[in-house]
Image (spheres, rainbow, N blue to C red):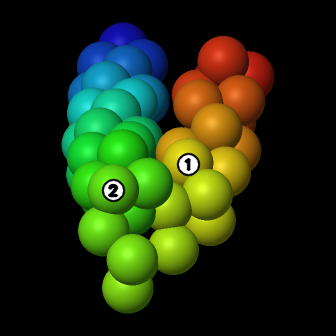
Amino acid sequence: MRSIHRLSLTSVLLRTMLLLAIAVCAIIGVAGLVLPLVPGILFLCIAGLLLRQLGRT
C-alpha cells in the first residue's frame, strides 16, 4: 500500500515538473518570437516535445 502512495506522489511530482518546464519554455519561446537574440522556435519546439511526453505519462 505504501509503494502505491509513493508511486502516485512521484507521478504527480513528475507531471508538475513537466508542466513547469513547458510553461518556462513556452514563455521564452513567445518572447523569442519578438526579441531578436532569443531563439523562439527552438524553445517552442522543446515545449511541444515536453507536452507530448506529458501526454504519454
Q: Position of residue 37 (x, y in %)?
A: 38, 85
**Residue positioned 51% across, 74% down in the render:** 39
Q: Is residue 57 above or below residue 22?
A: above
Q: Which residue is mark 1?
A: 44
Q: Nearer the viewer, residue 29 or 57?
A: 29
Q: Secondary structure at mark 1?
A: helix
Q: Is residue 25 above or below residue 17?
A: below
Q: Nearer the viewer, residue 26 or 34?
A: 34
Q: Is residue 40 left or right of residue 50?
A: left
- Name the quadrant of the C terminus: top right
Residue 53, quarter of picture: top right
Q: Is residue 16 above or below residue 45?
A: above
- Mark 2, Cα crowd under 10 Å, few <14 / some 14-19 / many 20+, is few
Return the mark for residue 26: none
Q: Amino acid at mark 2?
A: Val
Q: Position of residue 26 (x, y in %)?
A: 38, 43
Q: Nearer the viewer, residue 15 or 8?
A: 15
Residue 20, quarter of picture: top left
- Residue 18: in sight, yes or no? yes
The first of marks 1 and 2 along the sequence is 2
Return the mark for residue 34: 2
**Residue positioned 49% across, 61% down in the render:** 40
Q: Amino acid at mark 1?
A: Leu
- Mark 1, Cα crowd under 10 Å, few <14 / some 14-19 / many 20+, is many
How many numbered circles does the render carry? Answer: 2
- Residue 17: in sight, yes or no? no
Q: CA distance from mark 1 to mark 2?
A: 13 Å
- Name the quadrant of the N terminus: top left
Q: Nearer the viewer, residue 34 or 57?
A: 34
Mark nearer the viewer, 1 or 2:
2
* Outermost residue toward the bottom in this view: 37
Q: Is residue 20 above or below residue 32?
A: above
